[in-house]
Image: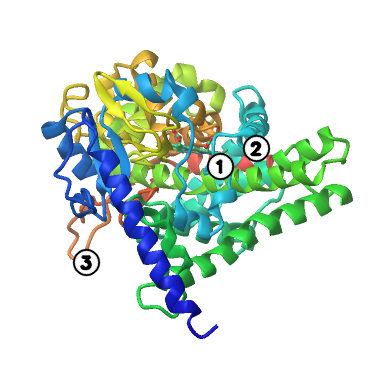
Amino acid sequence: MAGSVPTVVFVAALVSVGYLISRSLTCLKNGLPPGPRRWPLIGSVLEIPQKHQWVTFSKWSKTYGDIVYLDALGQPIIVINSAKVANDLLDRRSSIYSDRPNLAMANLCGYGNTFALQPYNDNWRQQRKLVSQEFGSSAVRHYHPFQEAEARKLVHGLVDDPTTLPRQTQLRIGTIIVRATYGHYITDENDPFLTVPLTAMENFSQATAPGVWAVDLLPMLKYLPTWMPGTVFLQTAKRWRKIVMAATWNPYLWSKKNLALGTVLLPNLCANTIEASDGKLSEEQEDRLIWAASTVLGGGLDTNESSVLTFFLAMMLNPSMQAKAREEIDRVIGSDRLPVLQDRPSLPYVRSIMIEVFRWRPAAPLGIPHALRQDDIYDGMHLPKGSLVIPNIWHMLHDPTVFPNPMEFNPDRYQGLDSEMDKITNVMFGFGRRACPGKNFAEATFFALVSTVLATCEILPVRDSEGHTVVPHVSYSSGTISFPSPFKCDVKCRSPEAYDLLAQGYSADEAT
Ligand code: HEM
């Protein structure tokens, strides 16, 4: 036994070097897409930035074009910098581009069980079916009154205290998605139904960030003993795994128990699935439901929250656009009632603002990586089997040849046309068979909030002690989900009548 640990390390090192050499030799094949310089063994790993990769990938499009090839210690990576190429490959050839890469760090943390990271197999197909059924365009209509009521509560609360913007946004977005998934109504921002999944999502964003974890590039590192220097990631993974398990199991067990007691809010994803099986889910089916539900919760939290915060930021910086949206709402809806989701078709400017938020600062700038199942040829280039395929959504939405002055927030660029707006949602919710199944639900939550704010409030910059307006510096976090850096804004209600409408607008719908 005494010699076993050094032996393991030696064998791991030997196998790693062999693995690197074989992967490097594979990459010497002709016909690979262009990309930054690759060195023997390490490939282009030194060129891959640790943060805000989408910006560097976007710059590379000028030098290398729409498809950039990277080699990270032998792991082939294809970055797609064009919506057309993404459609050609991820949509049209989805039978071979719908796998997920084996993200070693995410797997160590337990995220590999979530259906967003499941390989393209039958388990994934069953989970996807469950979620698509529950969150399809007609099924989600049932949740509209609830989404409207929560949007009104959020705005009401912000008028009372605008400094609570991040906390209240988290609370309301969380309340909506937890209600639809498990039938539980959150009344308190310290509710573990909210706090535990939020922590799990914060960790997910880090655990899945491309190029950050050495173990993703050299999966054998996971076998290293934890006493070895450089293995802090193993302890991190152990800690994060406990959180993933708690975020997944506790809400489900609560939901199942309370469904039997008749104390859950209906409908919800778990109840509908359990009831559809007459309460006779097999162990395998139940396991699928548990992980599908926790993925839905995770998928619907940070993404929507990031978009809501970006909306407040964009509105504060663009008062004339707020005025134009108010004018549209006053003209179409009047001031006697608040907008509802059914008003969407008649409010093209409000819709354009919402879509421009999605384009200007996409919540998931690199989406979730796909994986290529077999060798492919595109435009004369060889795309190797096993490649990690990263759609650079941020670049696709900031390509100056498609969106002139892309950094400018400009809802008029769509001229109120759905056909133009669809170009954004077709990209920002991802591609092919892995495209976001929560799109309809997410858009409804976001429209409810955006239209309610614009109908009732003015978003203003705060003032310093000398009365000067404080304009925040716009910057965003790195990671799979990108958030605006903390900023302050003021939320002023337009009139006492608007304030009353907000308060009346949710009392009748409380927790339904
Ligand atoms: C603004 C809000 C949202 C954005 C920007 C967003 C974006 C995305 C993106 C880019 C992907 C990866 C697609 C791909 O692999 O090509 C994805 C996947 C996913 N999203 Fe969303 N999403 C949002 C809201 C939601 C909501 C509300 C839910 C749940 C109701 C949800 C559930 C999921 C799930 C389960 C997946 C994994 C799908 C799979 O792997 O098959 N998302 N989302």
How many other residues sit within 10 Å of disc 1, few (<14), some (14-19) or many (≥20)? some
Judge whether 191 appears above or below 38 on screen.
below
Please, which residue is most extreme toward the left here? Answer: 63
Quadrant showing the C terminus: top right
Q: Which residue is mark 3?
A: 465
Q: Are marks 2 and 1 in contact (CB under 8 Å)?
A: yes
Along the line of sight, which residue is nearer the eye, 196 or 145?
Answer: 196
Name the N-terminal-most of marks 3 and 1.
Answer: 1
Q: Is mark 1 within 8 Å of ligand 1?
A: yes
Name the N-terminal-most of marks 3 and 2.
Answer: 2
Dot in front, 3 or 2: 2
Judge whether 109 appears above or below 100 on screen.
below
- Side of 108 relative to 311 (left or right): right
Residue 123 position, x and y percent, is: 65, 37
* Residue located 53% across and 43% down the image: 300
Along the line of sight, which residue is nearer the eye, 421 or 61?
Answer: 61
Q: Secondary structure at mark 2?
A: helix
Q: Gap in Å between the C-alphas at discs 2 and 1?
A: 8 Å
Q: Which residue is mark 1?
A: 118
Q: Secondary structure at mark 3?
A: loop
Judge whether 149 appears above or below 440 on screen.
below
Q: Gap in Å between the C-alphas at discs 3 and 1?
A: 53 Å
